[in-house]
Amino acid sequence: NNTRALYGLAKKAEDLGVRIITGVEVKGFESNNSTGAVAAVETDRGKINCDQVIIAAGPWVRDFWTMLDLPEKISIKTDEGDLRDNIDMWRFWQLEEGLLSINPDQLLTNDGKIPPVLHVDTDAPLFSDADGSLITDKLWGIYYKPDWHFNGIQGGSAPYKVETPVSEVQIDPYGPSSPEFVSGPEFAHMWVSALAHCHSRFQNHIKYYNREPSGGIGCFTADSFPVFDSFRENAYVIADSNHGWKMLGVGRLVAEEITGKSQSLLEPFRFSRFEKGKLHPTSNSPFPWS
């Protein structure tokens, strides 16, 4: 359960002496005029002087990037050595997720244990479980798992690109509260049909799809991989590129790096990789985060 996991992580931090202040909106950063370093964080509850800033803001990273006066457009060196200019640093993808309201025990393993998240990528033709029509004969993918918090089978499919100009994307209200970025009936049809494609036990289950709003948007870097790097001398950005839950251990590496211990594991994720052409491999998966 994500909520309980967050509270558990918060308790671990507070047990170490961290003070967590919620309900505070960051408005900008005050700079040291001589060095450009961040001298204070400006919030809706006043100014906070600081020696070091760490930003791990998930899909809101675009806004913090702008507050730091970092480039909205970047140059990328290709494998052929060509330098391509004016590339968006960020791009948004609509995350397609939903819930099948059935007993989640249906996905327990044969010995009654909780399974891993199941992920399927295939180019096998996908036919509708509702009327037998062809949904796609191109590459498609889904993921799914039993979820006892929501009491059903929860999962999603490959996201799609948000075509709105990056600077105009309205991130808030986020998730199910968004009037724009929630999963629609096309997703429900595809995803439940894909579940039926993978498991006959889910055939004729479209009627159990939960119609409550679900989904959200993710903010990805230019190559869809994270950026872990320091800017303006003392502003460390953890741009997770929608990988957040998979990367909880990165926090420790960043803490050690900030306190003077270099971290070779973080080197492939520096911002400079774009201009140097040290990009990560392009995945053949329909998921940009694979």
Image (tube, rainbow, N blue to C red):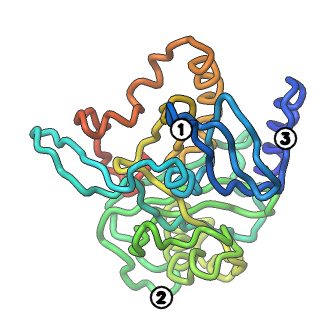
Tell us which disc is closer to us: 1 or 3: 1
Q: Quadrant of residue 86?
A: bottom left
Q: Nearer the viewer, residue 58 or 94?
A: 58
Point out residue 260 in the picture as x, y percentages from the top left corner. 57, 12
Residue drawn at (74%, 53%) of the image: 43
Question: In the displayed structure, would residue 129 be above or below residue 116?
Answer: below
Point out residue 98 in the picture as x, y percentages from the top left corner. 64, 69
Q: Nearer the viewer, residue 190 or 246?
A: 246
Helix, strand, or loop for circle 1?
loop
Of labels 2 and 3, earlier in sequence is: 3
Residue drawn at (65%, 76%) of the image: 178
Image mark for residue 20:
3
Q: CA distance from mark 1 to mark 3?
A: 29 Å
Q: Nearer the viewer, residue 201 or 219?
A: 219
Q: CA distance from mark 1 to mark 2?
A: 66 Å
**Residue pointed to by mark 2:** 131
**Residue pointed to by mark 1:** 33
Point out residue 90 in the picture as x, y percentages from the top left corner. 42, 56
Residue drawn at (62%, 80%) of the image: 206
Residue flagged by tag 1: what amino acid is it?
Asn
